[in-house]
Image (cartoon, rainbow, N blue to C red):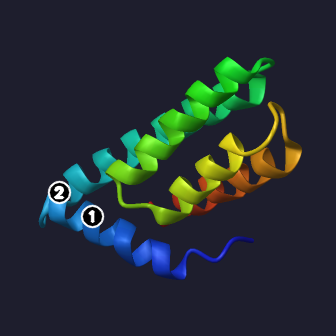
């Protein structure tokens, strides 16, 4: 299991800043983040060429940056530094997605 302790604080602060005290908006933002994460993770897993892998990894990095998730930015960079289909990166991204989904 990945350690999200420090990352979780930044991520939660970003959600709180965006949603304020509106818990339904917070839930909607988290759901959108999770949906985007899952879409790009799926595209990354199905990528068979460098170009598709790179585009999905860059989108994941952008998603992480926009939500202040340093861990997602780092995982996306790790994907950029590996070959398409790298099972280690895909497994780490799956663990990250599971952890984020549990935060909801």
Tell how many labels.
Answer: 2
Q: Residue at x 48, y 64 (%)?
A: 70
Above or below residue 75? Residue 36 is above
Mark 2 Cα shell of 10 Å, populated few (<14), some (14-19), many (≥20): some
Measured from the top left, where is residue 75 in percent x and y?
63, 54
**Quadrant, the C terminus:** bottom left
Closer to us: 1 or 83: 83
Above or below residue 55? Residue 86 is below
Q: Quadrant of residue 74?
A: bottom right
Is residue 47 shown left or right of residue 12?
right
Above or below residue 87? Residue 45 is above
Measured from the top left, where is residue 41 in percent x and y?
64, 36
Measured from the top left, where is residue 3 in percent x and y?
64, 77
Element under disc 1: helix
**Residue lying at the far bottom of the rendered structure:** 5
Mark 1 Cα shell of 10 Å, populated few (<14), some (14-19), many (≥20): some
The residue that disc 1 covers is 14
Measured from the top left, where is residue 8 in percent x and y?
45, 73
Compute the Cα span from label 2 to label 1.
6 Å
Q: Residue at x 69, y 71 (%)?
A: 2
Q: Residue at x 22, y 66 (%)?
A: 16
- Contact, CB < 8 Å: mark 2 with mark 1? yes
Q: Report if residue 62 is visible in the image.
A: yes
Q: Quadrant of residue 28?
A: top left
Q: Report if residue 101 is visible in the image.
A: no
């Amino acid at each position: 299991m990945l350690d999200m302790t420090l990352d979780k604080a930044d991520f939660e602060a970003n959600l709180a800043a965006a949603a304020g005290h509106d818990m339904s908006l917070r839930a909607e933002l988290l759901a959108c983040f999770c949906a985007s994460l899952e879409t790009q993770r799926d595209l990354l897993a199905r990528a068979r060429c460098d170009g598709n892998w790179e585009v999905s990894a860059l989108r994941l990095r952008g998603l992480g940056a926009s939500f202040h998730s340093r861990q997602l930015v780092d995982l996306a960079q790790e994907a950029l530094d590996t070959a398409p289909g790298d099972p280690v990166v895909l497994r780490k991204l799956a663990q990250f997605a599971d952890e984020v989904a549990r935060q909801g």
